[in-house]
Amino acid sequence: MPKRISLYITGLMFGMSITSYAQSVVYYPFNSILGLSTNPSKAVWLDVKFQTNSYFSSLSTDISPEINLKKTPKSITYLGGGVKMNYLNAIENNNILEGYFMNFGVRLMPFEKYKKVQIAFEISPYAGRKFDIGVFRTNFGIGYNFSR
C-alpha cells in the first residue's frame, strides 16, 4: 500500500509540474473551477481544471488535450476529451479515475484593447468511469492568456 500511495503522489507532482508551464488561466466562478492550460492559441494544447471551494475528499482534476477547430482574431473554437481524476482517492484505496468527458468550447476575445482577456464557455458531457451515471456540464468564466 505505501508503494501505491507514493506512486500516486509522484504522478500528482508530475502533473503539477506540467501545469506550472501554464500560459493561460481561466476561472469559472459559477462552478468554482480553476483552469490552467498551455497556449490555447496553438493547434493542440493541454487543459487542466482543478475543483476549488470543495471538501478535500472531493478535489477533482480534469485533464484533457484540446484541438482548435477554428481560430479568428476574436475567438477560438475547440474540441477535446479527457479524464476526471481524484488523486486523494488513493488514500482510501479507491480508484483515482472518476470518469470521462468531452469538451466543446469557445474562448472569446471581446476587448480590442485587451486582447489577452478571454471569456470562456464550454459544454462538457461527463460519464462516470463505469458509464453508470452522466451529467451535462457547462462552464462559463473569464481568463487571461499570458502568451501571444
Image: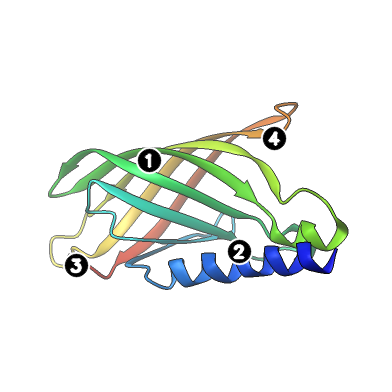
- Which residue is label 2 attached to? 11
Mark 3 neighbour density, 10 Å: few (under 14) some (14–19) many (20 or more):
few
Q: Which x, y percent locates residue 67? A: 31, 41
**Residue 125 appears at what percent x and percent y?**
55, 32
Q: Nearer the viewer, mark 2 or mark 3?
A: 2
Q: Amino acid at mark 3?
A: Tyr
Q: Residue at x 57, y 44 (%)?
A: 83
Kindly report the distance in space between the C-alpha atoms of the residues bearing marks 1 and 3: 21 Å
Is 74 on the left-hand or right-hand side of 93? left
Q: From the top left corner, tell me how far across and down residue 145 is, in percent.
A: 28, 65
Q: Which residue is mark 1?
A: 105
Please name the residue shown 75% across and 26% down the image: 132
Q: Is residue 82 left or right of residue 104?
A: right
Q: Tell me the number on the disc at residue 128.
A: 4
1 vs 2, front mark? 2
Question: How far apart, in angstroms, are the residues tagged by discs 3 and 4?
Answer: 39 Å
Single out the mark in the foreground, 4 or 1.
Answer: 4
Q: Earlier in the sequence, mark 3 or mark 4?
A: 3
Tell me the residue at 18%/63% (across/down). Answer: 115
Point out the image quarter for the N terminus: bottom right
Against 129, residue 35 (above or below) is below
Answer with mark 2 or mark 3, whichever residue precedes in sequence: 2
Residue type at mark 2 is Gly
The residue tagged with tag 4: helix, strand or loop? strand
- Snapshot quadrant of residue 91: bottom right
Residue at mark 2 to residue at mark 3: CA–CA distance:
37 Å
Task: State which mark lies toward you, 1 or 3.
Answer: 1
Establish if 16 lies above or below 140.
below
